[in-house]
Each structure stands twice: as structure tokens, then as C-alpha cells.
Image (tube, helix red, strand yellow):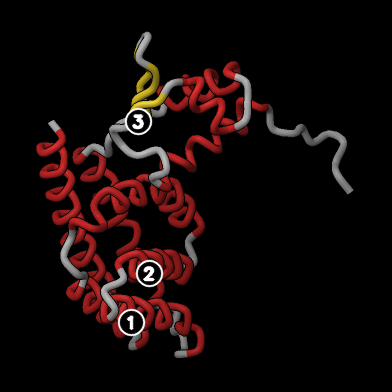
Amino acid sequence: MTDPNTKSPSNAQRALQALREMIFSGQLAAGSNHLESELAELLNMSRTPVREAVLMLEGQGLLELRPRKGVRILPVSPDDMREIYDVLTELESLAAEQAAQKGYGISELAELARAIEDMEVAVASEDLEKWAEADDRFHTELVRLGRNRRIENIVMMMRDQVRRARITTLFMRPMPLKSNEAHRRVYQAIEQGDANIARAAHRAHRQQAREMLVDLLERHRLRAL
């Protein structure tokens, strides 16, 4: 039964959520330009809630509203990615360490192992989209296994921005062979209960991913100028 005290989201809130998802999924591509009337038609809404949503998204740094020119979806900033990956590296490495301390059996690590296997299959078939999906599952499961809700919450807040960067750079990067090897090392350390190795291996993996991603974003930005 619906709680009578529960308020339905307003049209502006629905517009905000829909536009955020379109930005983070790449449907509204970084650097693209759109009229408010176009966005309103896309969402099947009037312009008023769309304008409210646009102003909120501008405050979040996802787009800019230009007088008489409409809306521009802002590109992912290399500096933002540096900061986000610095935080992700520390938190996920701590989660890997904590997971290794739990004494998990093979059955409890099945989802982590399945994600690695799916990544390896995707690389073998050169399917970067399937690899990215399995990579997301690996990192989500790794954080869950650490059993620290605060880490889970903070990492979840940052995941959308990482997804945006990945969409921008996914087909610019080489096949992630080294990434798969790194995932396997982290898994083995957790399975063996070696917390120090789990933390160090994941830290090295995330630092390498950070440098590659930031480098691709910087080169992509230069080409776009």
C-alpha cells in the first residue's frame, strides 16, 4: 500500500534524473549542444521543469547554460578524474584489504571470479563494452566484500563520473590485458587471505588505470580544441 505521506517526484525532479542518466550514459554526449526546447521534447515535458533541471545540473558542473545558444554538455575534466581516482584508489584498496581479512571461501568469491572470467572472455572476443560491464561488476563486488557501508556509499557517489569518463575513452584505449591480470592478482590475494598483497595489488591497478584514463582525456581534449 502506498504511503499517503510519500510525495511523488515533481516534474523537475523527474527531468533532473532523466537528464543525468542521459549524460552519464553518453546519450547526451560530452561537448554536445542542445536547445531547451529539444530537451523538453525528448523528455515529453514542458520547458519549465526542464529549465529547472538544467539549472540544477549546471550547479553540479555537468552542463552550462549559454544565453541564446542553449545547453552545452560539459566534457569530463582530467583534473576531476585525477581527484576522483585518488579517492577511489584509497577506498577500494582498503576494501580489498578488508575483504582479504574476512576469510572468504571460494563459493563466497564466486561473483568476483565470474566477473574476471567474463572480462577475459570479452577481451578474447575484443568486446570492450562487455569488458567494461564485467569490470564494473568486479569493482562493485570488491567493495561489497569489504563490508564497509561508508566506503560503499562514497564509491557509489563517484561511479557515475567514472562511467562518463569510460564512455569517452573506452574505444580509444588498448585492449585491457594488463587490467585483467591485475584483477586476477587481487582475487588470488583475497582468496589466500593476504591483506597486504590485496591492498597493494589493487592500489597499483587503480593507479595505472588513473594514469591511462587521464592521459586519454587530456589527448582527447586537445583534439577537440
Please tell me whether residue 67 is drawn above or below residue 215 in the rendered image.
above
Q: Earlier in the sequence, mark 2 or mark 3?
A: 3
The residue furthest top is 67
Circle 2: is it few (<14), some (14-19), or many (20+) Cα within 10 Å? some
Identity, as a three-letter code, of the amino acid under mark 2 = Lys
Task: Tell me, yes or no, if residue 21 can be seen here.
Answer: yes
Residue at image mark 1: 121
Which residue is denoted by mark 2 in the rendering? 130
Helix, strand or loop status at disc 3 = strand
* Residue indicated by mark 3: 73
Q: Secondary structure at mark 1?
A: helix
| Residue 196 shows in the view | no
Q: Secondary structure at mark 2?
A: helix
Q: Residues within 10 Å of mark 3 (few under 14, many from 20)?
A: many
Q: Position of residue 147 (x, y in %)?
A: 49, 67
- Identity, as a three-letter code, of the amino acid under mark 1: Val
Look at label 3 and name its amino acid.
Ile
Q: Relative to 210, does residue 48 appear above or below in the rendering?
A: above
> Mark 3 and mark 2 in contact (Cβ < 8 Å)?
no
Cα gap from disc 1 to disc 2, whole angstroms: 9 Å
Disc 2/disc 3 C-alpha distance (Å): 26 Å
* Upstream in sequence: badge 1 or badge 3: 3
Whether the residues at callouts 1 and 2 have beta carbons within 8 Å, the answer is yes
Q: Quadrant of residue 193?
A: bottom left
How far from the left and from the top, in percent, is residue 191?
A: 37, 86
Residue in the image at 29% along x and 46% along y: 84
The residue under the point 79% across, 36% down is 6
